[in-house]
Image (spheres, grey):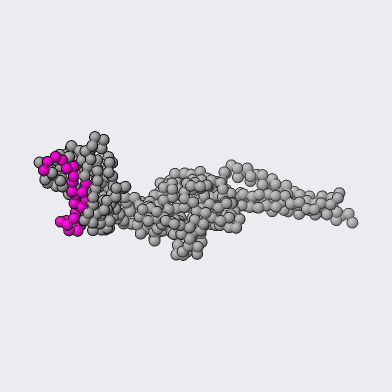
Amino acid sequence: MSITSSLNAAVSGLNANATRLATISDNLANSETFGYKRSDVDFSSMVLEQRNSTYSAGGVNVDAFKDVRAIGSLISTGNATDIAVAGRGLVPVTDLQGTTLTGDDRDLMLLPTGSFSADQNGNLRTQSGKYLLGWPADSAGDVGSVSRNSGGSLQPVNISTSQFVAAPTGRIEVDINLPADATQAGGPTGAYSLPIEYYDNLGRAQNVRLEFTPVVPATGSSNEWNVQIFDDAGDPLVSVGDFNVTFLDTTANGGQIDAVTASGGATYANATGLVSINLQHGPVDIFIGRPSDTSGITQLSAAFSPNSVTKDGAPTGDLQSVEIDDRGFLQAIYDTGFRRSLYQIPIADVPNMDGLIARDGQAFSISAQSGDMYLWDAGTGPVGGISGFSLMESTVDIAAELTDLIETQRAYSSSAKIVQTVDEMLQETTNLKR
């Protein structure tokens, strides 16, 4: 009976608009919630099989969903570990229990933004209890081979283990000039000493000394030097490596290295210009220059002059702060000025963002409707970069929600009017038999 179908359609209209009212209420309540993705509804008509000379109302069906694809505006904050995804994508997080579990056993969630701070164990977490996950990096800032289709390689981001750090020296670069006159007949026979400070495995400052001794011929010029390397951390009188270097005196390449021969525990590579030795704390490469190259050691008619001597490594430093760059690397900054990458925070993406399951605290979980997750490096592929010192605002537009509220109220009242009208018509039909 058509009048009955009208009642069913009106009731479905009441239910649909009640659902829409619930999403609007949720949106307005969270209009100031950082990272909140507005809820929305999708109305679709329901059509019943029609018969000749009659029409049956099917009503309306409603599907509620989170508009996860929407991106809120970013605002600046004063906290370095306030992070937001500047574009598509979400950062991986877990709950407290997940910090004690490994790999795929933990509850993996995704978050658009978060204000993270260290808990009593040094794990970065939000006030709502979401713990940041990332790939741990080695001393060179490399995360190695990681799983990008699951959270198996992710670990809770912990900064307490990096309170103190020391980085041993692994490379020294020497840019000096040796006096050409010293290798001429009758030149001085003394050695020129170049002490270079380096850092051992414990962060202590040590010295390695390069002793340059000219080869003085009886006549003419040899353009040749013998170099001995001493490590003051061991026996300062015993060389840890030697090399002999000769220089060109041609018009085009005068003063540049001609050949290097290493001995006594040292090796030399023409392609890299590195002399490799073993100091007390481990192997170190010293860049002296390549043959026929203008960088490194030169021999010109000038005084012995160390133009530039540089080294890597750092002494023991106290952790001052942490920052996250736009590539997703969380860097520890120490009072010595040394920076070290501790973790890389990836950006998760799924084919259907709106298919994610909403969780408490603005988090989302993977579902069959969302599709499989892939973890990208920040700022690559379809995902955006990571913005530190930033939080993402709610995607709710209050003015638009209030407009929708008025429309919903009118639609609900109209459906209620249909119910009232059907009731009166049915009452009229009942009165026909009286």
Q: Quadrant of the N terminus?
A: bottom right
Q: Residue 114 vs residue 296: left or right?
A: right
Q: Which residues are magenta?
A: 218-245
Q: Is residue 186 above or below residue 2?
A: above
Nearer to us in this view, 42 or 276: 276
Q: Quadrant of residue 240?
A: bottom left
Going 14% across and 40% down the picture, which residue do you hit? 220
Which residue appears at 47% of the width and 52% of the height?
Answer: 346
Asked where in the image residue 305 lies, by quadrant, the reply is top left
Is residue 191 among the parts visible in the rendering?
A: yes
Q: Position of residue 246 (x, y in %)?
A: 21, 44
Q: Is residue 335 above or below residue 293?
A: below
Q: Examine the structure image and report whether residue 321 is included in the region drawn in magenta.
A: no
- The percent position of residue 388, horizontal first and vertical second, equals 43, 47
Task: Write the residue at 43% across / 53% down.
Answer: 344
Decide if residue 111 is on the left or right side of residue 314: right
What residue occupies the far right of the structure in this picture?
433
Residue under the point 53% across and 50% down: 36
Q: Quadrant of residue 175?
A: top left
In magenta stretch: residue 240:
yes
Question: What is the total number of numbered labels drawn onto the structure image?
Answer: 0
Q: Is residue 97 above or below residue 92?
A: below
Residue 44 percent across, percent down from the top left: 70, 49
The residue most toward the left is: 186
Q: Is residue 29 visible?
A: no
Q: Position of residue 204 (x, y in %)?
A: 24, 56
The quarter in which the C terminus is drawn is bottom right
Q: Which of the pair 407/380 is nearer the observer?
A: 380
Question: Extreme top residue here?
Answer: 251
